[in-house]
Image: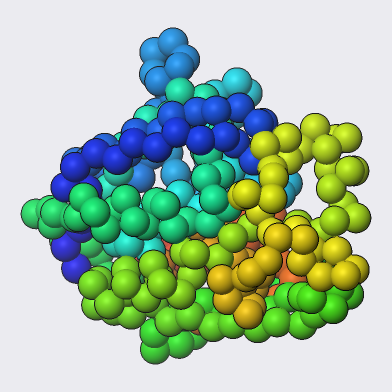
Amino acid sequence: MQQHTLAAQITQIGVGLHSGVSTQVRILPAEAGSGRYFVRVDLPDLPIIPAQVAAVSHTVLSTQLGKSEVYVRTVEHLLAALAGMGVDNARIEIDGSEVPLLDGSASVWTANIAQVGLVSQPINNQAPLAVTEPIWVYQGDAFVCALPAAETRFSYGIDFDLPAIGNQWHSWLLNAELENASASFATEIAPARTFGLLHQIEHLQQTGLIKGGSLDNALVCGPEGWLNPPLRFANEPVRHKILDLVGDLSLLGTFPIAHFLAYKASHNLHIQLAQKILDFGSALKVKIQDY
């Protein structure tokens, strides 16, 4: 249960999905116990934004951390890559307000992490929280929950009227062995790209969103099918939803032992569940202390 950080720094430059602005990201090794955190190097005093649930400030079509002018948005793919590859501690320096979308997936990040490798750190993680009772949130027919389980698993379902997507389900097990877990994440989940619906694009652009989106960094689906095939997986859209869920739940620091099950959920519901898990963990500690 040792912690890990990067063996060397990683640098990437790219355009943000919503802002359309190019930013540079440098991911540096960080001290044991420091966690994953962002540093806005373009702002005075280099403000730090922790990758924690308490720092979430916005969840419309992406997850944003920070407050007022000190924020960073669309963090979920990068954070999923770090957590999925076993990076507990990382200093993420960014010279703008949005993490680059790159190819729309987490593959570039996972390849970079695999290339530089990890180093173990002389600190023992606390045993991960084990969910012992169902924890869930819902909105209409959409929901996300954490169920008691022997292993950590992420399962997701989506349902769209467009025939090319339709109803899809996928399940991914987070292997207890770091090497196996990172290899599985890098091949099964990280390559899945963000996707959008053709009939929604004009409205999103009019509201100031997806300024940096293109057929090079997002799958687009219309009534006649995909505008930019081929897909990397037959069920690439639902695998991307697992990628988003992994990134959002990484804000817990470590993944609890639970089966995370979601259907037609959103970043907002993901974060609501994460907060409920934190509340459950706090209540459990009080019970143990009282006992």
Q: Nearer the viewer, residue 102 or 77?
A: 102
- Relative side of 170 to 201, left or right: left
Residue 70 appears anywhere in the view: yes
Q: Nearer the viewer, residue 236 or 132?
A: 236
Q: How is the image coloured?
A: rainbow
Q: Residue furthest left?
A: 122
Residue 99, how many percent across, how many down? 52, 38
Vertical order, 7 against 181 (above or below): above
Residue 31, how many percent across, how many down? 19, 41
Vertical order, 80 against 216 (above or below): below
Q: Nearer the viewer, residue 23 or 229?
A: 229
Picture quadrant where residue 30 is located: top left
Vertical order, 74 against 268 (above or below): above
Residue 97, how many percent across, how many down? 56, 28
- Relative side of 26 to 208, left or right: left
Residue at image x 51%, y 53%?
77
